[in-house]
Image (spheres, grey):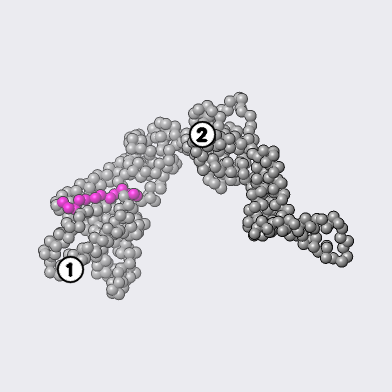
Amino acid sequence: AQRTGAVYISVPEALSSLISEAVPCQLSKDIRAALQSGQRVPDPLVIQAVRFRLLSPDSLRRGWVLDDFPCSKAQAEGLTALGIVPHRVFMLLAPEAVIYARAAELKSAAVEGQELQQELALQRERLQGFSAQSPALRVFYATIFENVRDIDASRSKWAIFDRAIQETTESLRQRLQYYRRTAMSLATRVKGMCFTSARLETVSGWKHYCPVTLSLQNELVCCYDRSMAVEYHSKVYWMASEEYAELFTEDPEAFLQVPLPQLPRLLDDGERARKAEARAELKDFCPVTLVETGNLVKASAYHLVEYNQNLFRFASREAALKFMRQPLRYRNAKLPKKLPAEVSKEEREASHLLSCLVKGKDGRGLQPSDMVTYMQASLAELICQGLVECGERRPLFPGKGPEESALLCLSRFLRARNPLNTEMYAGKMSDAREEFLKGCALPSDLKEMTEKKMSPDYAWTSTETAKFQELCARFDEVFSQRS
């Protein structure tokens, strides 16, 4: 601070100055009440006190060095929400042994009454707090603002001082260059300016698309790297690479002559469901595959892009992303005059099923998607029919529970309806199914015959006697098998 002429600010100094000046505001009253209660001053009050100090005339005129704050990600987010972002965040890193040794030296040379600040237990507690909070704090500033600089604190204090001065000088150089170029209405990089996200949202009509990529490669590339952003006429333009950022900075007007075209949009799940039956361009053939290989490939219903109020389907997500980068290249694809015959849904499922079976036979292994398609194409309808029949019949085989009876009914239905059965085996399974259904109806049939036989008003015939004896024999046979 002395070398650069900046104002040195710490949290204790900011709190004490706010109270000692007896500023007639609610903030000073709240801080004084917290201190008098013996409790820790809440973070929101500390952040407001620091902000008050940073906005003082001397800090605004000379700049500032804020020591040991923020200490956590929450405090950093609070400062950022108020528009306060340090140009550089210096993190002094040193081994524990060096820290404790220097604390012992400072304790021996400390002024009377300040020895407590250099106690080993207090330094250990501070180090543990730093180790717990610094990773999240580092990620916050490094990811968003790229202003974190590590300094090897195990070196001499002169080496540490020189490194800090070097980084501060570089930061001032970047800012002076930014102010100089913007004053001359020139394009300038915003790298190192530590702008907040709200400041960078003053985007141009190009949104986050790179104008250089569109001009040189005829591609739409969406960019979000803050280090590649360029400001021109108070608007922020996003570039795809360092090279393109330099080209745009040198001559921005050369890349802004062509306006941003209409953007394609990849539909989400809900939109795809609503437009599942809509006819896409090129008769549902993939335009990317057609342009790049000349082959006609039926597109998937899962990759749907809307462009110029038209729908395009694609064979894969990669093809859809290619279209979104170069829509002008693929939108004008032309179908050949002779097209293959339309294939029904059943034929497509059968073809895919055959390819899956061949893949399994060749030892290449089936993918999960192949297995799902196989189940849908070959078993789903049959299983649904079996479940419907079980639900309607509600079978209950003598001596078995409802669940076991339903499973037996379903298994016999599937065996009888298996399309791979031979004619003889299909007949055998159908007979077995009929026998099972007769067994399920046996108790109710036997009860009905018994009621008729015991009724004095019913004329019992010899045919019914034979049938009754047959039912009794079958009943005994079922339970004898169970035992």
Q: Range of the magenta residues?
A: 143-155
Label ID, residue 272:
none
In the depicted view, which residue is nearer to us: 27 or 118? 118
Q: Mark 2 belongs to which amino acid?
A: Asp
In the depicted view, which residue is nearer to us: 371 or 413? 413
Identify the residue under disc 2: 362
Mark earlier in primary sequence (1, 2): 1
Q: Residue at x 27, y 42 (%)?
A: 177
Tell which residue pokes out farthest to the bottom in this image.
Answer: 37
Quarter holding residue 33: bottom left
Q: Residue at x 20, y 57 (%)?
A: 96
Q: Is residue 144 magenta?
A: yes
Quarter holding residue 372: top right
Question: Where residue 236 sits: x, y (%)?
Answer: 38, 43
Disc 1 is placed on an element classified as helix
Question: Where residue 28 sits: x, y (%)?
Answer: 30, 69
Q: Residue at x 20, y 54 (%)?
A: 94
Q: Does the image show residue 457?
A: yes
Above or below: residue 296 compared with residue 69: above
Question: Where residue 5 sits: x, y (%)?
Answer: 19, 54
Q: Judge the density around disc 2: few (<14), some (14-19), many (≥20) Cα neighbours within 10 Å.
A: few
Tell me the distance, in whole angstroms, between the alpha carbons under discs 1 and 2: 78 Å
Question: Where residue 356 sits: x, y (%)?
Answer: 55, 37
Label ID, residue 116:
1
Q: Quadrant of the C terminus?
A: bottom right
Above or below: residue 266 compared with residue 16: above
Disc 2 is placed on an element classified as loop
